[in-house]
Amino acid sequence: MAMKHFPAEFKADAVALYRSRPGATIKSVAADLGVNTETLRNWMRAADGRRTGGHTAPRPAAPVAAEGMEAELVALRRRVRELEEERDILQKAAKYFAGGDALVNRFQCVADLRAEHGVKRLCQVLGIARLSFCYWRATSLARAARQAADEKLTAKIAAVHAASDGTYGVPGVTAELREAGGESVNHKKVARLMKTASIAGFRLRRKHRTTVADPAAAKAPDLIGRDFTATEVNTKYVGDITYLPVGGGKFCYLATVIDLASRRLAGWAIADHMRAELVVDALATAERTRGSLAGAIMHTGHGAQYTSRAFADACRRAGVRQSMSAVGSGADNAAAESWNATMKRETLQNRKSWSSEREARLELFRWLHRYNTVRRHSRLGHRSPITYEHALDRTSTTLTQAA
């Protein structure tokens, strides 16, 4: 076969191609170019200044192009190492972001891995400012102290909430912590901790109608006019009837007499009927509690029990002036309606009913006395009704002595 003739430029490019591919062999490059392996080897010897087929050592001087490629190779290898380290960091950081990519999670990741990868590199990979991490580290002790204090306060909040039968919301819990627990605490902080711990009071779900008016009955004038306040105890009362579900579609009924000055439950009665004697018994209980109701106003709705002759006679004997709201207007007896809602919310706690009449009576007996003596009322400066009345008595005595 005739020998091929190659231009000098082709020979130089072939040699340069081989030298630019550190992992390639002369045989593979020669095959790519379609030349004989020994021919390419001779071109390389010639480029190095050696005789064809000779064994003289190559001159140490390297071409400028080869030096540039070597530097590029070093840079690429460094970049590969950086990418491998970044991959390792992100793999280790994955567990810190399981609950969300919060900034504090990234800070904690840097703190845990700093000995292995360095703070600067970790901050670069995780995308956070190095100064921010340093500040977070510097304040770690104070933050840990706050967290411990929050955990301690949360335990107290849970205890107060449990002691209230799970009924107190933020205002009630805050008042109890301040007075009984001696805690100087902001209600917003209590709200935050209660929300975090999933602690909340109960809300009422449904209503049941108990007021059935008698169109033919005599009506009393409205002496309250939606002013559900009083400066002195035993002067203005509101009364109402509410149902107590006891299972099996049955009901008991609770009649109340509430003092508008202290919100104290002065009288109450429970029965399995809604006859007039139910409200008469509640009024009689209030009279025994106060000793006398003479001159007081008794404000009620237009239910047949309150418009009955029996109740009118009981009020007259006790010296009580009857007052009635407008027909069909719950707002005209809002204080009693609100009390009923609170009682059901805190005793039933979203149950549909009590299992029996006995259970209902016992739970109501406990709660009604607790309401007067222990339970904090928002309208009374978060004091119980009896505590509020004692405060009024002390104030009245002080003013009398000063006069």
Image: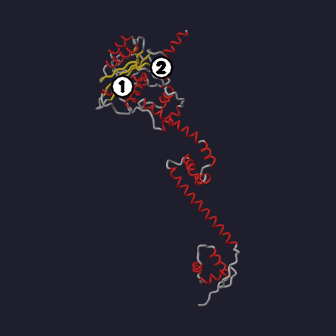
Say which of 217 and 369 sits in front: 369
Residue 160 position, x and y percent, is: 45, 30
Q: Quadrant of residue 319?
A: top left
Say which of 230 and 27 sits in front: 27
**Residue at numbered disc 2:** 388
Give the total number of marks visible in the rendering. Answer: 2
Q: Element type at marker 1?
A: helix
Label placed on residue 138: none
Say which of 209 and 156 sits in front: 156
Residue, x 47% and y 38% (percent of image)?
A: 197
Q: Quadrant of residue 23?
A: bottom right
Whether residue 196 is visible, yes or no, is yes
Q: Element type at marker 2?
A: helix
Q: Label 2 amino acid? A: Tyr
Q: Label 1 amino acid? A: Leu
Residue 110 position, x and y percent, is: 57, 50
Which colour style is shown? secondary structure
**Residue at numbered disc 1:** 364
Return the residue found at the far left.
Answer: 248
Whether residue 227 is visible, yes or no, is no
Mark 1 nearby-residue class (10 Å; few <14, some 14–19, many ≥20): some
Per the model, the C-alpha gap separating discs 2 and 1 is 22 Å
Residue, x 53% and y 54% (percent of image)?
A: 92
Locate the N terminus and report the quarter of the image it occupies.
bottom right
Residue 353 position, x and y percent, is: 33, 31
